[in-house]
Amino acid sequence: MNVHHLELFYYVAKYEGITAAVRKMPYGIQQPAVSGQILQLEDELGVKLFNRRPFALTPAGEMLYDFAYPFFAGLPDVEERLKGEDSQHLRISASASVLGNHLPQVLENLKLNTPELKLTLKEVAPSDVYNQLTTQQADIALTVLHGRLDEGLRSIELMTIPLVLLVPSTCKVSTLDDLLREGENGRLESKLPLVGLPSHEALSQIFQDGLDKLNVDWKPSMEVNALDVIQKYVSRGFGAGIGVGIPGVDPIDGVDVISLDTFPPLVIGGIYQGKMKPIVQEFLRITQKYVENFQSR
């Protein structure tokens, strides 16, 4: 049985005629098309479903209408219930550092405005952000905005964070220049090994771009997957590390921070696909307000 034909029959039976059904159906369709598809349904079932003039359901039509009525009559209510539940559901994907720093306060503020908030958080690697969106597993992803977005994705900038260099406190250096020396091929190199993230990460690429502009060759000899792990190795004297100056977050004991004022900052933003849900719009509004208030302190 063709479900679309069954739906047309439901409206014809409900409004007691094809002409009335065409006027009152929630979507546009021509009367001849309805008549033709109802005839196809009758041919498929091998029964007559209603008399045309005057309109009256046959016993077979009464049976079919009793079957179809609960489903089609309940669709508007189900749609509203689903929309109501989904309107309160926010799904966020982000890296561990984003999930752990400032986001809890932002979400607390959001919950004050949306008491029925249903929240789904997922920690992902920055390289997996796009997949979370294109597979509909997240409404918004919070990540570094760097390079071109995949087709169909959009972004909104939320804040910028400066890059910093992490060094062991025992080094007693205060600038990047203090760590550099003449290397091969007329380029500079570092006196310390570098602890960094994998080369495909945006932070690593931005850091290397900054070094290139200073004519410095300095590739990581140790690659780890998280910024907090970099700090742990730096604090134990294994080398200098790539870091970011997250507002309100101090380095761990044994780590000093060197500013990298000539390096481009990290741009943190939200990436989404298609039309933004109202709950996502509210989340971004509260996030932007939080960032403005925090940076004005």
Image (cartoon, rainbow, N blue to C red):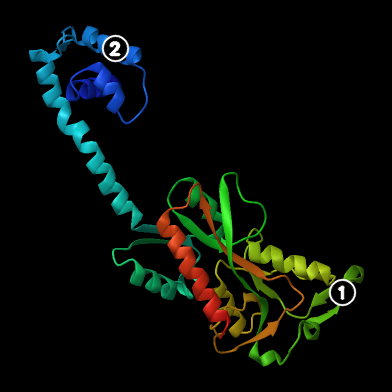
What's the residue at 44%, 72% (across, down)? 106
Against 138, is 249 above or below?
below
What's the residue at 12%, 15% (across, down)? 57
Q: Position of residue 65 (x, y in %)?
A: 14, 23
Element class at badge 2: helix
> What residue would you read off at disc 1?
183
- 68 relative position to 196: left or right: left
What's the residue at 85%, 74% (across, down)? 188
Q: Position of residue 223 (x, y in %)?
A: 62, 67
The answer to whether mark 1 and mark 2 are in CB contact below 8 A is: no
| Residue closer to the observer: 242 or 105 | 105
In which quadrant of the rendered view does residue 123 lie?
bottom left
What amino acid is found at the position of numbered circle 2 in the picture?
Answer: Ser
Q: Nearer the viewer, mark 1 or mark 2?
A: 2
> What residue would you read off at disc 2?
35
Q: Position of residue 156 (x, y in %)?
A: 57, 60
Q: Position of residue 221 (x, y in %)?
A: 68, 69
